[in-house]
Image: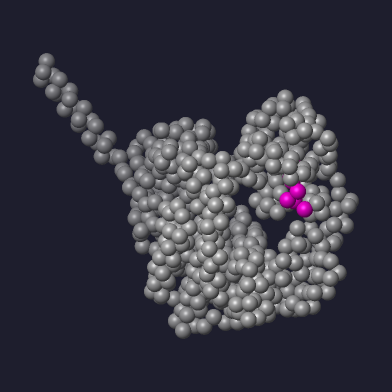
């Protein structure tokens, strides 16, 4: 019997050996591009019976991700292989991330054909913002050579290149380019942010064609820094009236830099190839990731003096690192401005940052947080943030620094002090500050007065033209708003604070309700309102009421002129009423959303826009 068992065991080993030999493991396969930083392939196991992708996932702790059952692989020959199953994850079900924010699971597909050399992973075109990874290599540790289009070159840089004077002219700039390694199913839009010192951060988009190309135009007031913000790490370039900025974006290199397994591998070339205004400077800004955050160690401190010491120590270290960078004189000058301004800003924000840290650490309520903040402010010396860090703000050449637009905002409160220290109230800082203030008024739906219009003559011609055009457009919008429908202003009436919210929503009892606590000055609120427009149209047959509540911090005329484009029910509360609701419902900021069922029960609450998909999902739960 013993000999028989031994013989059977030997036979099983012999049978398993050839099966084992046919299993091939590709550890950390290189890939071309992915549209997500949430998942990455750590290993591919090939056999005669299955293809298994080992997935490493990294996402917000205690949040979920989901893999669609429609997921598939597509090999280099065009053959597709549908998802069979998951190991450690169930397709179409929420996979909750652990406290670490990292997890692993496996996706099982049919066996690949023998001549497959690479595969693409996709959740399918029907999945909105679905995960995709293109060009996963199966038989090589190298990616196929990237074919560069004509014009995609790295420009030689003269290390003595001086920062030029910016163009001051109002006109139209063109931004165009191409996403390299583009595949069908990739993003259809690319997002840019114009770092305009008058308009501050202005977002715009360009449509991406089937070949990965994009092109758009935008009005600018002169040489203006901008970033492409669609790929995690910013890509810098400059826009200039009458000129074209051309960007060839190296997606495989951007994906490599964000990869857990390949970020230390040899680069696949520069992140971007740039042609156009200040191309050499833009190239260096996009190549050298010089981080000017100075609060890494300072946030460990608990008092203002220690915080400042830590910031200044980091500042000195960063200055040495900056001097060691292999960059031209012009780029170095811009980065010195960035470093100076970020030092000033860190010190100005110290009480707020330390308060937030103290509140979170000790789990304090808002009132206790205010008291702690006031205590810090009272102990803050007048010269805590040295104004000499702002000395370059009146240098016209430094308007080309990416953070200059923020410098205008933060330093405007002390413009009189700076004028006294500098011995003048003339120059680009003061002109730009006046123009920025007027533009903010226009952007808040408040037209310029006759006096303000007359004062435009004292500004540079480019600024005057921009403001005049913006004001005329606002006046036309206000006239058009008088004819718009789809919005309704509600009066609260005489009601106690305790009964306020119940009274407000009682009018809509029996209908699903989305309550949006917002403010006219809140950029994220306004962007969310715009993003939800298509959703509201899709759900128009669901009898949902959209209720927008704001307070007196939203100026009355601004509010009246803004809401015609926000269809729904609108209420503007007094400061006292707004404060009560904030305290009662523990509203931490705007936007905050409530979703209320037909019986008046709050079924969902979130501060910060959760995204259109999540909002739609939660609304549908109360419409059935």
Q: Quadrant of residue 239?
A: bottom right
Residue 300 vs residue 275, the one in the foreground: 300
Instruction: Residue at 56% x, 76% y: name it.
Output: 392
- Quarter of the picture containing the N terminus is top left
Q: Is residue 189 above or below residue 147?
A: above
Q: Quadrant of residue 494?
A: top right
Q: Residue at image x 75%, y 58%? A: 444
| Residue at left offset 83%, top offset 74% | 454
The residue stretch that appears in magenta: 548-555
The x, y position of residue 163, in whole percent, is 54, 80
Q: Main secondary structure of the magenta part?
A: loop
Residue 491 at x, y percent in the picture: 84, 39
Drawn side of residue 564 relative to residue 592, left or right: right
Residue 365 on image: x %, y %? 56, 40
Say if the magenta span includes residue 553.
yes
Say which quadrant the C terminus sits in. top right
- Image coloring type: one colour
Q: Please say whether residue 114 is visible from this viewpoint.
A: no
Q: Is residue 617 above or below residue 386?
A: above
Which of the 4 image quarters holds residue 603?
top right
Answer above or below: position of 414 versus 40: below
Q: Position of residue 275 (x, y in %)?
A: 55, 74
Q: Nearer the viewer, residue 323 or 430?
A: 430
Residue positioned 70% across, 46% down in the render: 518
Of 297 and 80, nearer the camera is: 297
Left/right of residue 404 with respect to residue 121 in the rendered view: right
Image position of 537 with respect to 325: above or below: above
Residue, far left: 3
């Amino acid at each position: 019997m013993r000999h028989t068992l031994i013989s059977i065991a030997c036979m099983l080993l012999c049978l398993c050996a050839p099966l084992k030999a046919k299993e091939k493991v590709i550890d950390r396969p290189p890939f071309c591009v992915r549209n997500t930083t949430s998942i990455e392939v750590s290993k591919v196991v090939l056999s005669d019976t299955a293809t298994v992708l080992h997935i490493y996932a990294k996402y917000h702790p205690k949040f979920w991700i989901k893999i669609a059952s429609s997921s598939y692989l597509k090999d280099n020959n065009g053959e597709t292989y549908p998802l069979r199953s998951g190991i450690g994850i169930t397709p179409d079900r929420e996979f909750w991330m652990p406290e670490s924010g990292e997890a692993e699971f496996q996706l099982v597909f049919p066996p690949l054909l023998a001549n497959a050399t690479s595969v693409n992973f996709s959740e399918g075109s029907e999945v909105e913002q679905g995960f995709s990874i293109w060009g996963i290599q199966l038989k090589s540790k190298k990616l196929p050579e990237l074919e560069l289009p004509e014009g995609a070159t790295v420009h030689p840089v003269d290390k003595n290149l001086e920062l030029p004077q910016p163009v001051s002219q109002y006109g139209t700039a063109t931004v165009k380019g191409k996403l390299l390694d583009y595949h069908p199913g990739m993003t259809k839009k690319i997002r840019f942010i114009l770092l305009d010192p008058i308009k501050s951060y202005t977002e715009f988009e360009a449509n991406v064609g089937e070949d990965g190309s994009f092109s758009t135009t935008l009005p600018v007031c002169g040489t203006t820094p901008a970033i492409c913000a669609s790929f995690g790490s910013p890509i810098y370039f400059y826009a200039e009236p009458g000129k074209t900025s051309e960007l060839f974006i190296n997606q495989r290199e951007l994906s490599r830099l964000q990869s857990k397994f390949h970020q230390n591998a040899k680069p696949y070339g520069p992140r971007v190839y740039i042609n156009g205004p200040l191309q050499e400077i833009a190239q260096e800004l996009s190549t050298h990731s010089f981080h000017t955050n100075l609060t890494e160690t300072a946030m460990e401190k608990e008092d203002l003096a220690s915080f400042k010491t830590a910031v200044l120590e980091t500042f000195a270290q960063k200055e040495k690192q900056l001097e060691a960078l292999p960059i031209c004189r012009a780029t170095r000058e811009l980065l010195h401005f960035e470093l100076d301004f970020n030092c000033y800003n860190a010190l100005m924000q110290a009480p707020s940052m330390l308060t937030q840290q103290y509140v979170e650490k000790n789990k304090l309520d808002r009132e206790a947080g205010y008291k702690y903040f006031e205590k810090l402010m009272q102990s803050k010396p007048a010269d805590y943030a040295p104004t000499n860090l702002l000395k370059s703000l009146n240098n016209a050449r430094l308007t080309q620094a990416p953070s200059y637009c923020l410098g205008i905002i933060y330093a405007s409160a002390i413009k009189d002090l700076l004028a006294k220290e500098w011995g003048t109230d003339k120059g680009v800082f003061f002109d730009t500050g006046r123009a920025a203030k007027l533009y903010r008024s226009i952007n808040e739906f408040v037209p310029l007065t006759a006096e303000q219009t007359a004062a435009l003559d004292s500004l540079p011609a480019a600024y005057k033209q921009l403001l005049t055009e913006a004001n005329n457009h606002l006046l036309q919008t206000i006239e058009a708003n008088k004819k718009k429908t789809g919005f309704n202003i509600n009066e609260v009436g005489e009601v106690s604070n305790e009964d306020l919210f119940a009274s407000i929503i009682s009018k809509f009892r029996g209908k699903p309700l989305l309550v949006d606590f917002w403010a006219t000055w809140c950029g994220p609120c306004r962007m969310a309102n715009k993003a939800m427009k298509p959703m509201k149209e899709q759900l128009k047959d669901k009898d949902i009421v959209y209720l927008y509540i704001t307070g007196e911090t939203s100026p009355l005329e601004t509010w009246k002129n803004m809401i015609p484009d926000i269809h729904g029910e609108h209420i503007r509360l007094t400061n006292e009423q707004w404060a009560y609701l904030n305290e009662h419902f523990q509203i931490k900021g705007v936007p905050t959303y409530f979703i209320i069922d037909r019986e008046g029960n709050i079924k969902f609450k979130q501060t910060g826009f959760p995204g259109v998909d999540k909002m739609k999902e939660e609304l549908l739960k109360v419409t059935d």
